[in-house]
Image (tube, rainbow, N blue to C red):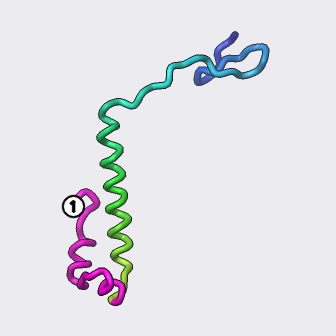
């Protein structure tokens, strides 16, 4: 069997995937991925908070000053 690109074999029956061990996520990814998700959630929440009008802000118990203070934070800041 001839070997093609990306581990695919070129045999008489067409393309077949070679038996390649699936890489396991490295331990660092177990910490990085949740952090990236948290940052994404903060970004989205603050973007939505920025769009609220006065009535909606009153519903959630925030003033316009508190809204501005929260929206000025970067996604990595709590």
Residue 59 image offset from top left, x and y in percent? 33, 84
Indicate whether 36 appears above or below 18.
Answer: below
Residue drawn at (58%, 24%) of the image:
6
Does the magenta segment cover residue 72? yes
Residue drawn at (50%, 20%) of the image:
21
As drawn, is 19 to the left or to the right of 42? right
Residue 68 image offset from top left, x and y in percent? 24, 78
Q: How many tags in the picture?
A: 1
Indicate whether 60 appears above or below 71.
Answer: below
Does the magenta segment cover residue 30? no
**Residue 69, picture quadrant:** bottom left
Quarter of the C terminus within the rendering: bottom left
Residue 48 image offset from top left, x and y in percent? 38, 73
Indicate whether 8 appears above or below 44.
Answer: above
Residue at the extreme right of the image, as rendered: 12
**Residue 50, picture quadrant:** bottom left
The part of the chain drawn in magenta is: 55-78
Residue 5 image offset from top left, x and y in percent? 62, 23
The residue that label 1 is drawn on is: 78
As drawn, is 51 to the left or to the right of 64? right
In the depicted view, which residue is nearer to us: 60 or 17? 60
As drawn, is 74 to the left or to the right of 33? left
Q: Secondary structure at mark 1?
A: loop
């Amino acid at each position: 069997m001839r070997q093609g690109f990306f581990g695919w074999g070129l045999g008489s029956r067409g393309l077949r995937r070679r038996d390649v061990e699936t890489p396991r996520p490295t331990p660092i990814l177990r910490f990085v991925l949740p952090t990236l998700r948290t940052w994404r959630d903060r970004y989205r929440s603050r973007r939505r908070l920025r769009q609220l009008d006065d009535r909606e802000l009153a519903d959630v118990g925030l003033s316009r000053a508190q809204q501005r203070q929260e929206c000025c934070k970067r996604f990595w800041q709590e």
